[in-house]
Image (tube, helix red, strand yellow):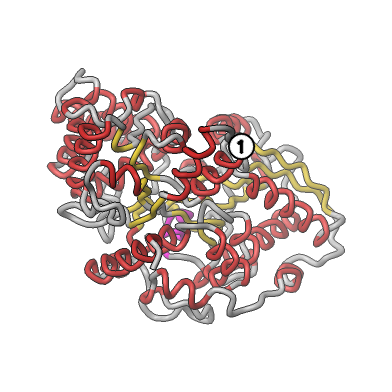
Amino acid sequence: MNSYDMNRRHFLALSAAAGVSAVARGVHAAEADGVGVDLSKWSPDYVRSIAGTEHYDTAAECYRVVPKDYSGRLTYWYYGPDQSSPQIDFEMDKAFWAAFKELYPNIKVDAQNLSQKVMLGKLRTGAMGNAAPMVARMPITWGAEFASKGQLMEFGPEDAGYSRAEFWPAALRSVTWQGKTYGVPTNNETMPFIWNAEIFREAGLNPELPPDTWDDVVRYSKQIKERTGKNGFGMVARVGAGNTSTRFMPQAWSYGGGALDEAEVNPSYRTTSVNSEGMRAALQASVDMYVRDKSVPVSALTNTQQENQDPFSTGNLAMMIAQPAEYLVMVERAKKATGPDKEIAQSAVDNMRFGLMPRAQKRRAGLFSGGNLHVFHPDTVDGGLDVNAAKAIMAFATGPEWTTKIAWVRSNPGNLRGFKTKWMKERLETVKGLDVGTAMLPYGLTYPVVPQASEIMDVIIPTMLQNALTEKMTVAEATDDAAAKINELLTDL
């Protein structure tokens, strides 16, 4: 038995022990109507068992919504592959547009691939100045802001030719504002916990077992630093970077904290949990690693996950939270390395392991993130909205084929039927760790579905981290400061 198989068995044991009780949080235990996917059985083995069992005709499904001979125009903004993306992301992006052109040869497309940082500001400015695109693929935290301002058109799965049962309930909540639906999920993302088995071995830790709890993460990180001189955990705390909260909030939720009450079964999004005992315990764990133990990169204050790639690839970082795509990134780095660096980079690939996100006193949690497609209100669109062109791309991009392909190494199909496609089977066979990240979906929690979500998660939470990590404020002061800022935002709801 190889080490990856051993780790996978450990993962399954952990899943059974945890009971995957999070399935009860808004996930239908019964088989989804007409979809043939039983979310109550979710596990790496179940996901593998259904992959490749069904065939879908994308053209036929799309043509039921918009006929092939339709002539029109489409403006489309999205966040696609960038300099940190593996080559497969670029290949799938190119294939996506080639397939859409073949499907709808008479729809003229003006598509812009934008970085998330640039895209949000550009969308805000465009929507206010009647220069928005017809359709945009956004991170799931953005939709509520534009819906609350009346800048999105009501549009749900049924408008794209699909049933609501084909989408994960948590994903549907992310496109809902005041009881109305303003988008369709494209991909659902939950990340695994990644570690270097060789560094664990050097530090005297079991190389095939991840830290089960966040307290273990703190302890492991300290032991790794003391015994090897290498950084233990790849903390990121940069203000204005979305992946700071994507890595800290699962830690906060596990301890029982939150930004608002988003971790509750029926959140109201009216009360804050950012200065709760659970949040303070989570923040203290980060302070212990950064200030007390000095077991994480000193550059964590300005780091994003991209800055963790070099030290992990060179064997100088033991643990991190990242998408399964990180494996292919490391593979490509090893291929490009030369001389002694090549052996070191290949060792990082060979010793890369994937496991569940750690738990704490309250729960095991991961961030349920991803992307949604939205149609902008005709009054905000430059040149007016071509409804049928918008429907065509929505049907194409949110069906089982392309929600699977476009998320190839990073995420999971937004359309549940995508898990049964041959492409899902191919992904599981070629992307190491994908099954573990996919199996985290039942543990996933979403950010608060409020217009201020981006401000809270990209600025207030990272600033809270910075205030505590730099010792500008105590943990209690930092959480109280964050609570005051969030409460001020809540007055606008």
The secondary element bearing badge 1 is classed as helix
Q: How many residues crowd around disc 1 within 10 Å: few (fewer than 14), some, or many (20 or more)?
A: few
Q: Is residue 155 left or right of residue 347?
A: right
* 172 drawn magenta: yes
State whether the magenta stretch is mostly helix, strand or loop. Answer: helix
In the rendered image, residue 373, in percent from the top left (x then y), is placed at 59, 52
In the rendered image, residue 66, in percent from the top left (x then y), is placed at 76, 65
Q: Name the residue furthest front.
A: 340
Q: Is residue 265 left or right of residue 435?
A: left
Residue 314, located in which quarter of the rendered image? top left
Residue range of the region highlighted in magenta in the rendering: 169-176
| Depth check, front residue: 124 or 44 | 44
Residue drawn at the location 37% of the way across and 29% of the way down = 459
In the rendered image, residue 74, in percent from the top left (x then y), is placed at 76, 47
Is 425 rendered above or below residue 95?
Answer: below
Residue 271 visible in the displayed image: no
| Depth check, front residue: 116 or 53 | 53
Q: Quadrant of the N terminus?
A: bottom left
Q: Is residue 117 left or right of residue 207?
A: right
Residue drawn at the location 31% of the way across and 23% of the way down = 298
Is 310 rendered above or below residue 429?
Answer: above
| Depth check, front residue: 278 or 448 | 278
Residue 6, located in which quarter of the rendered image? bottom left
Q: Quadrant of the C terminus?
A: top left
Residue drawn at the location 52% of the way across and 51% of the way down = 410
Amino acid marked by disc 1: Lys
| Depth check, front residue: 11 or 473 | 11
Residue 427 visible in the displayed image: yes
Instruction: Return the residue at label 1.
Output: 336
Residue drawn at the location 57% of the way across and 47% of the way down = 152
Q: Is residue 346 left or right of residue 403?
A: left
Residue 277, located in which quarter of the rendered image? top left
